[in-house]
Image: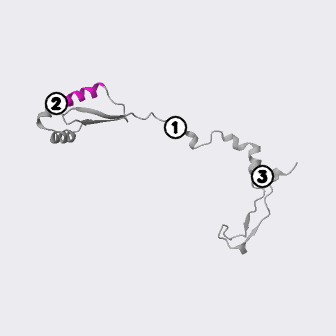
Amino acid sequence: MVTREWILQILWELPLYYWPVFFWELVQLGRWWATNPVEPGAMVTFQVTGTGRIVMAGYIPAAPPSEPQWSDHAPRAPWRALDPQVISGRLAALAGVAFLRCTLGAPCGPFTAPSRCTVTAPLRPRALDPP
């Protein structure tokens, strides 16, 4: 709560005739702290006036514990990704895209030599063919 260094610093700056007032305020502060404990995580700041009085300068309450958010790590409804309409919609989005097919043993990527890669026909998924 109150450290020895803080008390000595205040006594160094406070005139000698205000020391009894400051010590009385320390006793009252200790009694108040014992009857009104601050919850963990909260912060209370005190200041000392020029006459040795200790006043509460600020109080920052502790934040309530937040509820864990599992939805940050997993979707809320994973079964929706298995919906046939969603799957066919994703395949339809790929229907007009042409892919690079590299010859065997050649590295395939954006920096591949054009002589080793051929462009395949646009993908037409069988799921989109009429029955």
Q: Which residue is mark 3?
A: 92
Magenta part of the protein: which range?
20-35
Amino acid at circle 3: Ala
Numbered badge on residue 89: none
Instruction: Categorize mark 3 by other alpha carbons within 10 Å: few (<14), some (14-19), many (20+).
Output: some
Q: Secondary structure at mark 1?
A: loop
Q: Position of residue 80 (x, y in %)?
A: 70, 41
State the residue in front, 17 or 98. 17
Point out the tag, 1 or 3, that comes first from the N-terminus: 1
In the image, 30: left or right of 105?
Answer: left
Amino acid at circle 2: Val
Q: Which residue is mark 2?
A: 21
Examine the structure image and report whether residue 24 is included in the region drawn in magenta.
Answer: yes
Quarter of the figure that contains the N terminus: top left
Q: Nearer the viewer, mark 3 or mark 2?
A: 2
User: Which residue occupies 66% across, 41% down?
Assistant: 78
In the image, 1: left or right of 40?
Answer: left
Q: Residue furthest right?
A: 131
Q: Which residue is mark 1?
A: 68
Q: Quadrant of residue 57?
A: top left
User: Which residue occupies 43% across, 35% down?
Assistant: 63
Q: Position of residue 56 (x, y in %)?
A: 29, 32
Q: Nearer the viewer, mark 1 or mark 2?
A: 2
Q: Position of residue 107 (x, y in %)?
A: 66, 69
User: Which residue occupies 78% across, 65% down?
Assistant: 120
Examine the structure image and report whether residue 1 is included in the region drawn in magenta.
Answer: no
Amino acid at circle 1: Pro
